[in-house]
Image (cartoon, rainbow, N blue to C red):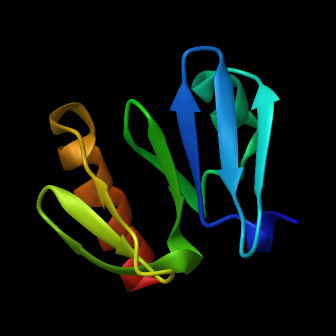
Amino acid sequence: MLREIFYTEGAYDYIALHLNKRKISCLQSMQEILQKLPADNFFRIHKSFIVSFEQLVSHEGHQVKMIIDKKLPVGNTYRQAFAAWIGKKHQQ
């Protein structure tokens, strides 16, 4: 199921897992789901979004483009760490 996750979206105490053809919502915080996802493939880019590296098409400064033609913001707080993470992923 992890390979099906494009990104997660948080809102208050709920998260939505955006999958290929469906969305699953559950009562969980972003921090809780982030601890359960493998850090080598998932990264928090915004207070409300965690993305899957496998589903990224491109990234440019303040946003990423997903394989499903969805653009998500990269928050100022996460931008530097995300750039380092994505750089490391491209070296592998």
Q: Residue at x 29, y 71 (%)?
A: 87
Quarter of the figure with the N terminus: bottom right
1 vs 78: above or below:
below
Position of residue 83 in the picture relative to residue 19 (left or right): left
| Residue 58 place in picture, x, y as percent | 30, 81
15 vs 32: above or below:
below
Q: Name, please, the residue furthest toward the top.
A: 13
Q: Residue at x 55, y 32 (%)?
A: 10
Q: Residue at x 55, y 15 (%)?
A: 12
Position of residue 33 in the picture relative to residue 51 (left or right): right
Which residue is nearer to you in this view: 32 or 69? 69
| Residue 84 place in picture, x, y as percent | 27, 58
User: Which quarter of the picture shows residue 30?
Assistant: top right
Q: Name, please, the residue furthest toward the right.
A: 1
Q: How many marks?
A: 0
Which residue is nearer to you in this view: 63 or 88? 63
User: Which quarter of the picture shows residue 25?
Assistant: top right
| Residue 46 place in picture, x, y as percent | 35, 39
Position of residue 84 in the picture relative to residue 88 (left or right): left
6 vs 18: above or below:
below
Position of residue 28 in the picture relative to residue 80 (left or right): right
Q: Name, please, the residue furthest toward the front.
A: 22
Q: Residue at x 25, y 49 (%)?
A: 74
Which residue is nearer to you in this view: 3 or 25? 25
| Residue 41 place in picture, x, y as percent | 60, 64
